[in-house]
Structure formats: structure tokens, C-alpha cells
Image (spheres, helix red, strand yellow):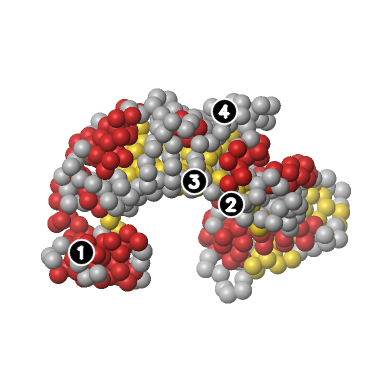
């Protein structure tokens, strides 16, 4: 256990702070600069100081030399170096891509890659995969490959074969694009994420199957407007146990909004249209799969009607191995606590707490008075509800909690007695914690023309608020 090989084998099995600290101490004893860098990262994870940061920068510069860019704002491989390993080597298509890869391959970093992300054309992807494979080194730490293909065209199978030969520990493959790989029969691969049903043809034929893939996350369509047509073919993944089709929401398209690894949904675009008959749906895709009888877990997009719930009940009644059904995204429809016809655990989110945009009365708004302000801001409820439909599911837990509290408060305001004059109707004032709305708006900016940006700026200007500060709010509607 005290040898370098023994410690690295232990880290491959269990990545924990204690083993990392012992490994770092061993490396320092051998004069390896990674040892001190690991110890610095462990310390920086619990406390930050200018001295620690400066020491780390000095070590990285001295160790990696020519890899450090002259422009401090230029991204480089060192940005992803943590705890002695490169967490993500990004290889994008540009004029100096091959030169940059050659520099990385010649550096002391190359044996310690954990994830590689390649973005570009099929030719670029093949070149980068070959470059990493032909360096005469087995990448034993490399556990994840991400490929973002630009334009259709299969990557040269020879590059795939070479890559598989030098990545014995590869566990995760994340592929996005049309017709990326004809096959990818890596024997160690267990987790597969595909964006576009055409991305890996080999997933749907048994000539050279991916024999150990246990989890598949499949989005039928890419982000470029192309739609899958017709039913999804039968999956040929003999070890599959989890099928995640939660990214296949029934909106006309998924859109890219910020993080490229997060899916956002847009049904409001002027070009949007409902999915046409014959395009695949998540439920019918599962129903059509012969291997559904071996699945122990399925993950679904939102369910939006009693009819969809009943169809799900019919499908899972024919899945004897099923242990868990998870609905990943909420919607306005309130799901039942359990499903008929199965003993599988049913995990589902609470229904959306805000009112449907189509059901809001014209001019429905809130008047919000921030502590220290005289006039207050009027914000349109429909603008916030529309943004919630797009962003709520992708917010972190604290932000979702803040917005859920806020929408429950808005609902309570609507139940108060309304007062009316010739121009408008309104409720009495009620107080709402300022800190909660601040948390919600900082996590999800509403924007639009309904005054939300002005309210956010007012909240920023008036901070810090005293403990327990409340906003004075009433609900109004124009007549």
C-alpha cells in the first residue's frame, strides 16, 4: 500500500482525501512536484489564502514551463489541474490544435489525464484521438471521453480502435452530434450519454456490441434543430440496466442556454411547433424496446396528463425487473404518489408552483417595496412564470426552494380580498423575506419588460439588508 503503484491502485478504487494525502506525501518523498501541488489543493479546498495561491502558481509555472500561455487570460491545460490530475483536457478545433496537443503530450501532465473533451469536425476528432493514442503511453487514469461533433460525418474507425487500445479504464462516453461513431466497442465502458439518436450507430446493432454498458442517457435530437424521425431502433446493449430518456421533453426543441452540458427547453419561440406525429416520444421508445424487461431503472421527462400516467402504468406492468421509476422534470400536472401495476419505487418532483402563463389575467402583477425605497417596483407575474418554465428545473436546490417559497406567497396574495377602483384592482400588503427573493433573482434573472431587472438592481443597491428585512408586496391587476 505504501508504494506508488499501490497508492495509485487504491485511488483508482476509491478517490478520497485520506488516500490523496498519503499519495501526496509519498510523491514529495520522491521529489515529484505533484506531491506538493496535491497538498496545496487539499489545503485550498478547506481554506483560501493569497500565499497558498501564489505558491501554487509558482510551482505550476516552474513545473510546466512552456505550457503556460503568455496571456494570463488564455485558457490552458493547467486550469483543469486539480489534486495532481488533469480533470478535463479540452481539445477544440483551431489552427494551433495539433501544436497544442504535441506540447501536452511532451509535458509531465500527460500520464495523469482523467477526462478529455474534443470539439470539432470528424477529421479533428480523429486527429486528436490518434495523437493521444500514438504517444506510446497507456492512459490508465483516463475514465471519460466527451465528443462534441460539428457537422455530420463518422470519425475514422481506425482512430477509435487506437483509442480503445490505450484507455483501459475508460468508463464514461458522452457523445453529441450526428453520425459521430460507427462503433465504439470499448470493453470497460459502463456509462453512455448520447445526444442525437444517430450519434453511435453501433448502439443499435449486434455486430460488435458495447457489452458492459449499464447506463444509457439518450436524447433523440441534437441542439441544431434536426429532429429524429420514426421510431428508435432496438438497443443492443446486453448489460443495460438504467435507461434515462429524461432529456426528451415534448417541446419543439431543446435550446443551448449557458452550460452546453445542460438541456433547456423552449416552447415559446415564434418558429416553434408541436412535435409531429411519428416523431419518437420517451414513453413509446421504452415500450418498443425488447430489452425493457431487463431494466431496473428508468428516468423520464415530465408527465403532463392522466393519459400519460396511464400509458406509463401499462408499460411498466410488463417490466418485471424494474425497481425504480424517476420523473426528472416537473410540470403543472400533479403526479400521483404511486403507479398501478408495478412494485417499483416511483420518484417524482412536486408540480410547478407558479400559475400557468395562459391562465393569468391580463395585467396581473406585483408591486414590491424594497426597504429604504419610496416608490417601489411593479413586476409582471407572467414574465416570471414564463422564465420559470424554461429555467426552474436546472436551478440548484437552494434557488428552487427560494422560488417555491415566493410562488406560494404569490398564491396566498391572490386569495386575499380584492379592492377595486375604476382603473385597477388590488390586494392588501403582505411582507416577504428580502433574502429569499434576493436568492431567487440572483440564481435566475427574469429580464423582460415587466420590471424584474429594475427590482433586481434595486435589491442589489439596497443591500446589505438588516436581519429579518421584509419586502412589502401587494398584487394588482389593471382593469
Residue hosting label 3: 239
Q: Secondary structure at mark 2?
A: loop
Residue hosting label 1: 4
Q: Secondary structure at mark 3?
A: loop
Q: Nearer the viewer, mark 3 or mark 1?
A: 3
Question: Which dot marks residue 227?
Answer: 4
Residue drawn at 36 percent across, 71 percent down = 46
Is residue 233 left or right of 15 when viewed as pictured? right
* Nearer to us in this view, 331 or 475: 331
Q: Mark 4 or mark 1: which comes first in sequence? A: 1
Question: Which dot marks residue 296?
Answer: 2
Tell me where residue 172 appears, x and y as whole percent. Answer: 41, 47
Q: Is the C-beta separation of discs 4 and 1 under 8 Å?
A: no
Residue drawn at 28 percent across, 61 percent down = 9
> Distance of mark 2 from mark 3, alpha carbons?
11 Å
> Distance of mark 4 from mark 2, alpha carbons?
29 Å
> Distance of mark 3 from mark 1, alpha carbons?
34 Å
Is residue 106 left or right of 188 when viewed as pictured? left
Amino acid at each position: 500500500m505504501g508504494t506508488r503503484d499501490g497508492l495509485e491502485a487504491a485511488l483508482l478504487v476509491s478517490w478520497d482525501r485520506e488516500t490523496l494525502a498519503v499519495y501526496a506525501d509519498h510523491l514529495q518523498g520522491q521529489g515529484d512536484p505533484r506531491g506538493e501541488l496535491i497538498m496545496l489543493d487539499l489545503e485550498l479546498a478547506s481554506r483560501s489564502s493569497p500565499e497558498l495561491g501564489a505558491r501554487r502558481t509558482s510551482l505550476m509555472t516552474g513545473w510546466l514551463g512552456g505550457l503556460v500561455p503568455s496571456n494570463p487570460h488564455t485558457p490552458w491545460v493547467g486550469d483543469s489541474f486539480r489534486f495532481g490530475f488533469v480533470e478535463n483536457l479540452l481539445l477544440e478545433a483551431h489552427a494551433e490544435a495539433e501544436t497544442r496537443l504535441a506540447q501536452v503530450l511532451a509535458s509531465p501532465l500527460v500520464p495523469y489525464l482523467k477526462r478529455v473533451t474534443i470539439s470539432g469536425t470528424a477529421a479533428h476528432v480523429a486527429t486528436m484521438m490518434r495523437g493521444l493514442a500514438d504517444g506510446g503511453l497507456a492512459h490508465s487514469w483516463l475514465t471519460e471521453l466527451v465528443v462534441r461533433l460539428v457537422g455530420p460525418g463518422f470519425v475514422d474507425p481506425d482512430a477509435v480502435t487506437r483509442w480503445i487500445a490505450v484507455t483501459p479504464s475508460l468508463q464514461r462516453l458522452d457523445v453529441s452530434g450526428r453520425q459521430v461513431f460507427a462503433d465504439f466497442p470499448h470493453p470497460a465502458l459502463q456509462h453512455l450519454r448520447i445526444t442525437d439518436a444517430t450519434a453511435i450507430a453501433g448502439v443499435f446493432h449486434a455486430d460488435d456490441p458495447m457489452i458492459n454498458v449499464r447506463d444509457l442517457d439518450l436524447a433523440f435530437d441534437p441542439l441544431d434543430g434536426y429532429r429524429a424521425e420514426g421510431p428508435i431502433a432496438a438497443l443492443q446493449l446486453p448489460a443495460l440496466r438504467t435507461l434515462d430518456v429524461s432529456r426528451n421533453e415534448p417541446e419543439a426543441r431543446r435550446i443551448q442556454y449557458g452550460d452546453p452540458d445542460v438541456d433547456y427547453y423552449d416552447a415559446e419561440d415564434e418558429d416553434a411547433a408541436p412535435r409531429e406525429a411519428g416523431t419518437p416520444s420517451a414513453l413509446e421508445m421504452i415500450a418498443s424496446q425488447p430489452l425493457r424487461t431487463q431494466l431496473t431503472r428508468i428516468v423520464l421527462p415530465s408527465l403532463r396528463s392522466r393519459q400519460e400516467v396511464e400509458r406509463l402504468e401499462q408499460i411498466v406492468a410488463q417490466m418485471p425487473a424494474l425497481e425504480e421509476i424517476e420523473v426528472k422534470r416537473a410540470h403543472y400536472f400533479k403526479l400521483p404518489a404511486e403507479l398501478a401495476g408495478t412494485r417499483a419505487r416511483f420518484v417524482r418532483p412536486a408540480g410547478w408552483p407558479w400559475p400557468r402563463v395562459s391562465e393569468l389575467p391580463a395585467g396581473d402583477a406585483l408591486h414590491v417595496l424594497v426597504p429604504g425605497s419610496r416608490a417601489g417596483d411593479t413586476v409582471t407575474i407572467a414574465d416570471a412564470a414564463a422564465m420559470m418554465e424554461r429555467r426552474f428545473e436546472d436551478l440548484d436546490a437552494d434557488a428552487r426552494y427560494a422560488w417555491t417559497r415566493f410562488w406560494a406567497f404569490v398564491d396566498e396574495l391572490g386569495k386575499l380580498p380584492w379592492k377595486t377602483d375604476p382603473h385597477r384592482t388590488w390586494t392588501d400588503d403582505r411582507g416577504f423575506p428580502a433574502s429569499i427573493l434576493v436568492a431567487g433573482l440572483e440564481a435566475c434573472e427574469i429580464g423582460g419588460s415587466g420590471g424584474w431587472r429594475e427590482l433586481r438592481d434595486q435589491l442589489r443597491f439596497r443591500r446589505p439588508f438588516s436581519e429579518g428585512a421584509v419586502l412589502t408586496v401587494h398584487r394588482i391587476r389593471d382593469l
